[in-house]
Image (cartoon, rainbow, N blue to C red):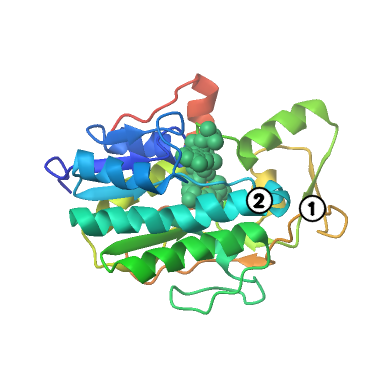
Amino acid sequence: MVVGKIKTLIFGASGMLGTELCRVFPDAVKLKHADIDIRDREKVIDAIIVNRPDVVINAAAYTAVDDCEDNQELAFDINGKAPGYMAQGCVMNKAKLIHYSTDYVFNGSRKEYFEADVTDPINVYGRSKLMGELNIIKNMSNFRIIRTSWLFGMHGKNFVDTMLKLSKEMTSVKVVNDQFGKPTYAYDLAKKTEEIIVLDHGIYHITNDGICSWFEFASSIIDNATPCTSKEFPRRARRPEYSVLVNTKTTPMRHWREALSEYLKLKEKGIKYLES
Ligand SMILES: NC(=O)c1ccc[n+]([C@@H]2O[C@H](COP(=O)([O-])OP(=O)(O)OC[C@H]3O[C@@H](n4cnc5c(N)ncnc54)[C@H](OP(=O)(O)O)[C@@H]3O)[C@@H](O)[C@H]2O)c1
């Protein structure tokens, strides 16, 4: 798809997904945390008005799920209120807004979740991300909210890298075997975003194909993972048991195993980017 003539602005340009988006949209206006704090409504709206983008992409978020439990106000300001400011700026500038949300807006008691299913987050991060979705929907109609899950990529803290590190430090690495989801490669999601820009407005569920437990995911990265239960591995934030997002609106992405294998090969070679 040709997006060359579409002017894009990316918030959160130095995050894991944001960095991949910068690769996919090289001509975008790229705003990092150091350039703008998205909690500042005036600055967010100004950035949109001054740059006059056709499409605003928000990859900025407070993603430390456990820390959100201790810093609730910060979580709601960044993940909940700021997307609403972006929506207001987009309306003033007649721009589309692409925003990323999460499987954690669901409680995980069902085996899979469709785009229109009822939300019911069970932790602060999920509640703050749901507030972000609602603040967008309240302010504008020309949005695409992309819910995704279990992101891994070259440019941020993620499960794959944590496993590789722990595997070297420990004889065996305990990983929970009773939470299920769909791992997603940040680069694949960034590429898919290009496609979604021109699809209908609304909520999308975009992940790599294939479902696994964290233990199964870990076992395809390292040799010394051992299964355990969530009870054996308590965290500050509760996690949904099933984080399986079903995509009914667009073509599926490749299987996570294929994406993971590519990621691991690139890491081994020390290559940060895929040639597009
Ligand atoms: N990671 C996952 O497994 C996952 C799963 C489901 C959905 N998602 C969603 O996918 C999107 C991208 O996630 P990601 O993993 O790429 O996140 P990430 O690597 O944590 O990147 C988020 C970026 O937002 C920036 N940021 C934080 N607070 C900010 C503020 N007040 N103003 C401006 N920028 C700020 C961060 O900067 P600093 O680092 O300098 O703070 C960072 O560059 C998010 O919407 C996230 O909720 C992620």
State which quarter of the image contains the C terminus.
top left
Question: Residue under circle 1?
Answer: 235
Q: In x, y percent, where is residue 100?
A: 43, 54
CB of residue at label 2: within 8 Å of ligand 1? Answer: no
Residue 270 — which label?
A: none
Horizontal side of residue 230 vs 254, given as left or right: right
| Residue at (46% x, 38% y) in the render | 37
Question: Is residue 256 or residue 87 the one in the foreground?
Answer: 87
Residue 258 makes an appearance in the image? no
Splitting the image into 4 quarters, where does residue 4 fall?
A: top left
- State the separation of the CA atoms marked 2 and 1: 10 Å
Q: Amino acid at mark 1?
A: Arg
Q: Amino acid at mark 2?
A: Val
Nearer-N-terminus badge (2/1): 2
Q: In x, y percent, where is residue 24?
A: 30, 38
Residue 47 makes an appearance in the image? yes
Question: Residue under circle 2?
Answer: 65
Question: Is residue 254 or residue 20 the one in the foreground?
Answer: 20
Question: Is residue 260 or residue 99 the one in the foreground?
Answer: 99
Q: In x, y percent, where is residue 171?
A: 85, 32
Task: Characterize the local packing of mark 2: few (<14), some (14-19) or many (20 or more) Cα atoms within 10 angstroms.
Answer: some
Horizontal side of residue 131 vs 206, given as left or right: right
Q: In x, y percent, where is residue 59?
A: 42, 45
Q: Are marks 2 and 1 in contact (CB under 8 Å)?
A: yes
| Residue at (81% x, 59% y) in the render | 230
| Residue at (67% x, 75% y) in the render | 109
| Residue at (29% x, 53% y) in the render | 89
Splitting the image into 4 quarters, where does residue 275 fall?
A: top left
Task: Characterize the local packing of mark 1: few (<14), some (14-19) or many (20 or more) Cα atoms within 10 angstroms.
Answer: few
- Circle 1 SS class: loop
- Circle 2 SS class: helix
